[in-house]
Amino acid sequence: MSQDSQTIKTAHQIVMQKGEMYVGWSTKEDVRKRGGSGGLVTSMLAAALEKKLVDAVVVLKKMNEFEAVPIITSDVNEVLNSAGSLHSVPSNFAKLIANRNLKVALPAKGCDVRGIIEQGKRNAINLDNTFIVGLNCGGSMHPVVTREMLEVMYKIKPEDVHGEEIEKGKLIFETKDGKEHAITIDELEEKGYGRRESCRYCTIKIPNNADIACGNWGVTGDLAGKATFVEITSEKGAKLLQNAIDAGYIQVQKPDEKGVAARSKIKGVMEGLGKKWKDKVFVPMDNRLEYFRKELENCIDCGACKAVCPTCSCGDVSKCTEFHFRGDAYRMSMYHLVRFLHLADSCIGCGQCADVCPVDIPLTRLYRRFANPVQEQLKYEPGMDMRKPPFFEAKLEV
Amino acid sequence: MNAYSTICPGCNFGCGLYIRENGTIDLDFRKSSPANAGKLCRFGMSLPRLYKPVKSMVEGKETTPEEAAKEAARRISASKGSVAFLSLGNTTCEEVLAFQKLAVPYLCTGANFDALPKDVYLTLSVGIPYTEIEAAKHIVLFIDPYEQYPLTVRRLLSAKKKGAKITSVWWKDLPLADENIRPADISKLQLTKDSLVISDFHPLSDAEQVKSVLSLAKNAGAKVTFLKPFANSTGAYVLSKDAKQKSFAQLVEDINKGTVKTLFCLESDPSTLIPSETLSKLTNLIIQTGHASAGTAKANVVIAHEPLYRKKGTLINNEGRGQALGGAGTNGLEALGIIAGTKFEFDSLHDAVKKALGIQAVDEFLIPKYDRPAYGAIQAAAKPPEAKTTLVSVYNPFMWFGLPDDNDFVELNLNTVRALKLLKGGTLKIKSNGSTIEKKFKVAPVQDNILLTGNRFGIEKGSITPVEISR
């Protein structure tokens, strides 16, 4: 690792501030090896716990290359041993920490951050006590689809996979024999593999709505793959990073201009791709009512889409369930109609509802059919700032 | 925070999920699970309600699991010759093997294999891989997948997307079916060797109906697969293949006759299957389980151990897929050891399970090869209901586990509503055997003179109940 002693920042040398950018890595060799991009995020979370900045941290407990379960822990070693970046674990942490009154730090993709902020607006999460470590995200994949993709497209056994990375538009799998297998994401998605549909049209690639935004975009030269690019986006973010430096868990240095420019360019390209996908998925249609009715006719009333929705904070008693009775014979259930209305201003397009639907209804697409025009018209992007959802403020004209 | 990778006990589909314990029980979606891709049905979403804590009890007094097991051993020993052992599955293969050693005198897996030809045993026990459902050209349903086995729906829709034709033989039109045939019009069903027949097999199955399905498939050279309502029913059946078993119908008869006085149930709630007047004839009802149920409230002895999700061991789903539970608990085996007067070692039982399946290790991504031998010709005499109006019970996980659901209504068609001049939002009177109940109704494309319910109203006589209806 290249470590220029003139530029590396260690304990008590600097005071972090909102708006600053750094490149950093873990001081712990085993974390650097195990974690993604130099293990900075893992070490920053562990330091927050160790120095009692927070009482708990959310980590992914890794089961295998395709599987991890999010847990809340107060054990520093559990944080240090947690999974690095896993593209085929499309979880969302907002509901996990909601209504627990925790002082917590957690890693968060753009959609996690948006969910957490929306829960904050609904008083289910205290944002003052929540340190959100944003992770750059080009998209995540469904693990079952990933396994099939490995066998069909890469011709490798899922059990032989040792690691994964997305670089220059390619999805790269490393096998246990040390070989790398790369296919462009475009080619994979043309064949129906690759990222989840909602990730394709997502345009939040660098989560500046978090307290700190971390990722490997913009890490250049010798540090490429060995360090994390960090942008501090709030006072809490500055505190989190400073704490990790002071605790001796991480080292940082200023990024070079080339890196800053590269990061900005990747962000622009990725956002542009997201917009193209949005136009491709949401083509205008005739007979919308019949389309929605047909898509929803197989619904088995499991309620999983509500349970997993990171912006819903209604709990068991809510309008969508209270106005719905399984004995009703409406052509489209009140449950879905109420949810369409509720999510028109609040859907963040995370894809969790479609992931968990037991009859494969493309729910996120249906919610976005309502949400896209509403949110565009209201110039409101849920989860991106603390603005109240417009429907919260709607008043009847008397 | 403890998180367990586990399998839903709601049926034998083998849906993977996570259970988190943190004061309360929460579930999370295990999206890498090959059986369900993390998706859960209405019952799966209700699991925190199912896993109600249970305490070891002897005649209503709380005790330790060890003392309860010792008391169970004493009562079983004292009732020698009149003890029956029931396990529907719902537990690990390792516990099933230990249970079998205990249950030699009277083993009941809750199936009625006695009433069926011996050569259909494995066809009924092990289904086909779900990928074969998705690859089928013609699928014939003798179930309501939405209500009974909901995770089948996405497999059927996937098959349909690939061009499969779906025929439903059911009392109600199903949204995904291309063709809906009523059970009484079974002669209209056309099967070929490209057809796949999906039915189910459970303790209350009508043997003649099962034979009829087997016979139809046999005559056409079609594939047939039977879904089952209890987790690891396949494991329980496969591992009991060579054991001497009593049928469920025989068990009920023996309790009624008084030749069975003590019933030991492993992870099985008899109150959802056996009429209460029959259960009340028992001297001893002993239940070993990991969660509270209506059955544990009635039992003389309750031996409480860890719930399924905290157990260590193997389940086998309907495809025959081995699935390892993510817990470490073996208290169930310890309790069975106390009752049997021996010590059951998990490792040796696990080796026996692997040997029986012909595998080196349990890998949920590999389905072991099962011998599903061809069966001979079958004579069947399934009869359609004779009564003018019939209440049909559509057995589903909520009913099998006695868990309340939002389904306190019957489904009937518009003709019936008009004939009885029923009012929208009103109720329907249903009379059977001198009892009358009043229920809400839902208009659905149901066969004339049929009422469908996924609930138990207390007036049923098996799955088909003749009733009279009025406004």
Image (cartoon, coloured by chain):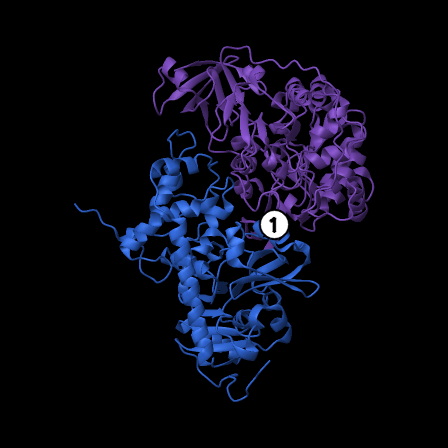
Chain colours: A blue, B purple
Could you say which quadrant of the image residue B303 lies in? top right
The quarter of the displayed image where residue B279 is located: top right
Q: Write the residue at 47% across / 54% down.
A: A95
Q: Which chain is mark 1 on?
A: A
Q: Is residue A71 left or right of residue B193?
A: left
- Please indicate, yes or no, whether residue A258 appears anywhere in the rendered image: yes
Image coordinates for residue B235, horizontal then vertical, percent: 72, 37
Which quadrant holds the C terminus of chain A?
Answer: top left
Q: Quick one: label 1, few (<14), some, or many (20+) residues within 10 Å?
A: some
**Is B213 or A347 nearer to us in this picture?**
B213
Q: Position of residue A5 (x, y in %)?
A: 55, 88
Q: Looking at the picture, tell me which residue is in the foreground, B297 or A27.
A: A27
B52 up-or-down from A58: above or below: above
The residue identified by callout 1 is A148
SS at mark 1?
Answer: helix
Identify which residue, B458 or A171, lies in the foreground.
A171
Give the image location of residue B52, x and y in percent.
57, 42
> Residue furthest toward the left?
A398
Task: Quarter of the image for the N terminus of chain A: give it.
Answer: bottom right
The answer to whether A170 is drawn above or below residue B288 in the figure is below
- Between B349 and A110, the one nearer to me in the picture: A110
What kind of residue is marked 1?
Glu
Q: Where is residue B238 in the image (x, y as percent from the top left)?
A: 75, 34
Identify the residue at horizontal 62%, vertical 54% (top origin): A150
Q: Quadrant of residue B73?
A: top right
